[in-house]
Structures are given as structure tokens and as C-alpha cells.
């Protein structure tokens, strides 16, 4: 799909996101599950049903509401970590043993 932003509906969150040793700004879909905010990082299509694949827990105290005139977009004042690469960054930073 050439433009994924058109697929997203509902709320968005702008956050700093770490993958391994790199940090960058990212826009993710934002959902609330039992009142707790979560950033949806990746989706998979299973039989035509869109299903979340990777999710980051967010700290509600670091989530800011949208500014006036900006619709459905929240800001997160912390850095999220991609769970797919968390073990990899620990291995890269670990001392080598023989």
C-alpha cells in the first residue's frame, strides 16, 4: 500500500521510538485498553481481519492531549522501545566472553 496513513483511523500518537541503538520520531496508532494507553507498532492481516502484532505500553502521565486545532493526535513525552529488537540491543551491548 503506497500511503499507509490513509488506513489509520481513530487516534494517533507522536513519540520518540528506539530500535536497537537508534532513536527516531514515529507516528503510531493509539488505543486505550481497559483505560491504559498503548501504541500499536505493527499490524498483520489474518484472513482479511486487521490484527495488532506489536504493541508498546505507554505511561498515561507522559501522554499529552492534542493541541487546539490538531484532531485526534496525542504526544508522548518519553521514548518507546520496539520489543522486536530489545533482545538484540542487549546482545550488542553485552561484554564478549570466550
Image (cartoon, rainbow, N blue to C red):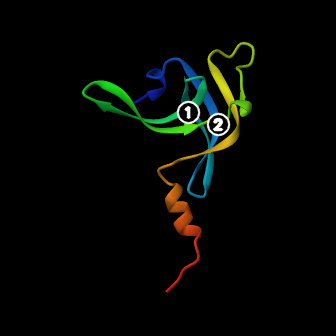
- Residue at left offset 55%, top offset 61%: 89
Q: Is residue 71 above or below residue 28?
A: above
User: Which image quarter is the N terminus in?
Assistant: top left
Task: Check contact, mark 2 vs mark 1: CB within 8 A.
Answer: yes
Judge from the rendering whether residue 57 lies leftward or rightward of residue 5; answer left or right. right
| SS at circle 1 | strand
- Residue at left offset 74%, top offset 19%: 67
Compute the Cα span from label 2 to label 1: 9 Å
Residue that badge 1 annotates: 39
| SS at circle 2 | strand
Q: Residues within 10 Å of mark 1 (few under 14, many from 20)?
A: many
Q: Residue furthest left?
A: 47
Count numbered badges in the picture: 2
Q: Position of residue 45 (x, y in %)?
A: 31, 31
Marker disc for residue 20: none
Q: Is residue 16 above or below residue 47?
A: below
Q: Position of residue 59 (x, y in %)?
A: 67, 35
Q: Position of residue 21 (x, y in %)?
A: 60, 58
Q: Position of residue 63 (x, y in %)?
A: 70, 29
Q: Nearer the viewer, residue 64 or 58?
A: 58
Of the two numbered discs 2 and 1 in the rendering, the one whose residue sits closer to the viewer:
1
Q: Is residue 86 above or below residue 94?
A: above
Q: Is residue 20 above or below residue 50?
A: below
- Residue at left offset 71%, top offset 21%: 65
Residue that badge 2 annotates: 15
Judge from the rendering whether residue 54 lies leftward or rightward of residue 49; answer left or right. right
Q: Residue furthest front?
A: 34
- Residue at left offset 56%, top offset 31%: 38
Amino acid at each position: 500500500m503506497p500511503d499507509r496513513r490513509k488506513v489509520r483511523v481513530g487516534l494517533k500518537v507522536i513519540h520518540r521510538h528506539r530500535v536497537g541503538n537508534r532513536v527516531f520520531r514515529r507516528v503510531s496508532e493509539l488505543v486505550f485498553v481497559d483505560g491504559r494507553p498503548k501504541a500499536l507498532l505493527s499490524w498483520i492481516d489474518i484472513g482479511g481481519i486487521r490484527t495488532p502484532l506489536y504493541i508498546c505500553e505507554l505511561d498515561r502521565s507522559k501522554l499529552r492531549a492534542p493541541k487546539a486545532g490538531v484532531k485526534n493526535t496525542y504526544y508522548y513525552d518519553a521514548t518507546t522501545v520496539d520489543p522486536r529488537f530489545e533482545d538484540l540491543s542487549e546482545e550488542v551491548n553485552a561484554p564478549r566472553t570466550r
